[in-house]
Image: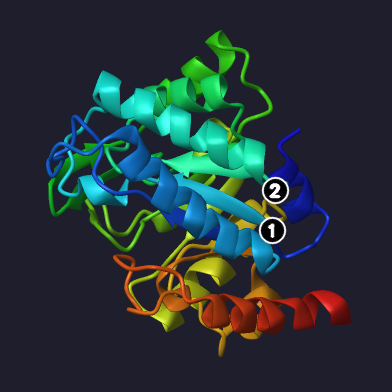
Amino acid sequence: MSELLRLLRAGKKPVVGMVQLAALPGGSRYRDATIGDVLEPALAEAEILAANGIDAMMVQNLGDIPVDTRVALVQATWMTRVASEVRQRFGVPVGLNMLENDAEAMFAVASASDADFVRIKIYVGAMVTPFGVETAQAFAAIRARTEWRADDVAILADVHDRTGVPLVPDNFEGDLDAAVRLGAADALVLTGKTYAQTHDFIAVARRVVGAVPILVGGSVTQENVADVNAVADGTIVSSSLKGSNTAFGRFDPAKVQSFMAAARVPRTAA
């Protein structure tokens, strides 16, 4: 079983820190970098997370924005190298997300790097994103996981992610049910366009899918993480841990330390 999934089901309220990469070859912004130019900053960021007690890490190709709908072979190859190095050096579960929403490529990388989980942002339904219309990846994900015997790689499925607009906006409950009951998602990632909407999403999801683990995928801060942990099973964080307060920046060790201290309070109390 996925180690992250084990933590979620055990009520440990894991914090997943994002390791966001510079542009990869095959992406829109790549300019003559070597693998070392991508790998070394990623390892430095991962070291800050690990040193401050992060529970898991997720490697993401943020530097490739704007993205295509398919991952290039060379992108997948470099992503595999980085994910493998992060997993081998740090004693926490490591997963990945590729912003192209290409589930087959993500499972190829995951199976080759021994990753623990993948996050798929459009798993069911269809979303209008800034870069076009993205469609459901549940079929591709389950087929790849089955064919490559990657049963221990957990699927974290976003439903109505805030970075897009659902083509059928009034079908949130139906998409929740489809992601879990038909799509076999192991956990859900819920992120509203506002913090209040995130709480609304969680309340609906608890009613529709019951005890399926829920992670909050954005807008989690040192100030609200205790409240988030009271209703969700885990968190995914990036911007609030960085000196720039945006995803495009470097981790501030003091912010990571303070966030993790705040995140541990409800876990200790439980």
Marks 2 & 1, CB-CB < 8 Å contact: yes
The residue at the point 70 percent across, 66 percent down is 53
Tell whether 222 sits left or right of 39.
right
The image position of residue 138, as x and y in percent, is 43, 30
Q: Secondary structure at mark 1?
A: loop
Q: In the rendered image of this protein, does residue 217 appear above or below residue 195? A: above
- The three-letter amino acid code for the residue at tag 1 is Asp
Residue 40, x across and y down, in percent: 42, 47
Residue 194 in percent (x, y) is at 36, 79
Q: Residue under circle 1?
A: 55
The quadrant where residue 195 appears: bottom left
Residue drawn at x 24%, y 44% is 23
What residue is shown with label 2? 92
In the rendered image, which quarter contains the C terminus? bottom right
Q: Quadrant of residue 136?
A: top left
The earlier-in-sequence mark between 2 and 1 is: 1
Q: Secondary structure at mark 2?
A: loop
Residue at 75 percent of width and 77 percent of height: 264
Q: Is residue 175 above or below residue 250?
A: above
Label 1 Cα neighbours within 10 Å, binned few <14 / some 14-19 / many ≥20: many
Nearer-the-camera pick, 224 or 251 = 251
Residue 173 in percent (x, y) is at 46, 55
**Closer to the camera in the image, 189 or 126:** 189
Residue 48, image quadrant: bottom right
Mark 2 residue crowding within 10 angstroms, few (<14) / some (14–19) / many (20+) = some
- Above or below 262: residue 74: above
